[in-house]
Image (cartoon, grey):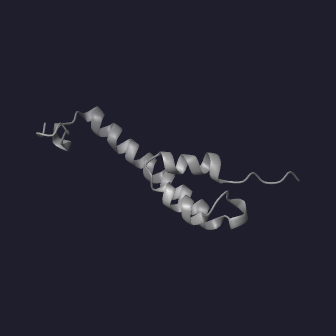
């Protein structure tokens, strides 16, 4: 282990490495999905500004999840 308490890749168990890889894939996928949705959704379909939600999407898991839960307007009933 390094002197600052952070484990290096070579010090991690196989399970820890797998969890790190899976977590990274999930995070990047959420980010990509949020950015794609923000870019393709009209401004009228988003609560707040596109610039704000684009910046927020880069905040780990919380940003994209917050966008999907709170940033999109629900479609009007048909």
Picture quarter containing residue 69?
Answer: top right
- Residue at image position (54%, 56%) is 33
Residue nearest the viewer, comparing 61 with 29 = 61
Question: What is the x, y in percent for residue 68?
Answer: 61, 49
Res 29 visible = yes
Q: Residue furthest right?
A: 78
Quick check: 71 left or right of 15? right
Question: What is the x, y in percent for residue 3?
Answer: 11, 39
- Residue at image position (49%, 45%) is 62
The N terminus lies in quadrant: top left
Question: What is the x, y in percent for residue 20?
Answer: 33, 41
- Residue at image position (86%, 51%) is 77
Q: Is residue 41 above or below residue 78?
A: below
Question: What is the x, y in percent for residue 78?
Answer: 88, 53
Q: Is residue 53 above or below residue 14?
A: below
Quick check: 16 left or right of 22? left
């Amino acid at each position: 282990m390094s002197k600052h308490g952070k484990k290096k890749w070579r010090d991690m168990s196989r399970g820890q490495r797998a969890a790190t890889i899976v977590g990274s894939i999930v995070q990047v996928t959420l980010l990509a999905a949020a950015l794609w949705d923000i870019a393709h959704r009209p401004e009228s379909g988003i609560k707040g500004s596109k610039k704000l939600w684009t910046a927020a999407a880069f905040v780990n898991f919380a940003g994209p999840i917050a966008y999907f839960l709170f940033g999109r307007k629900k479609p009007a009933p048909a």
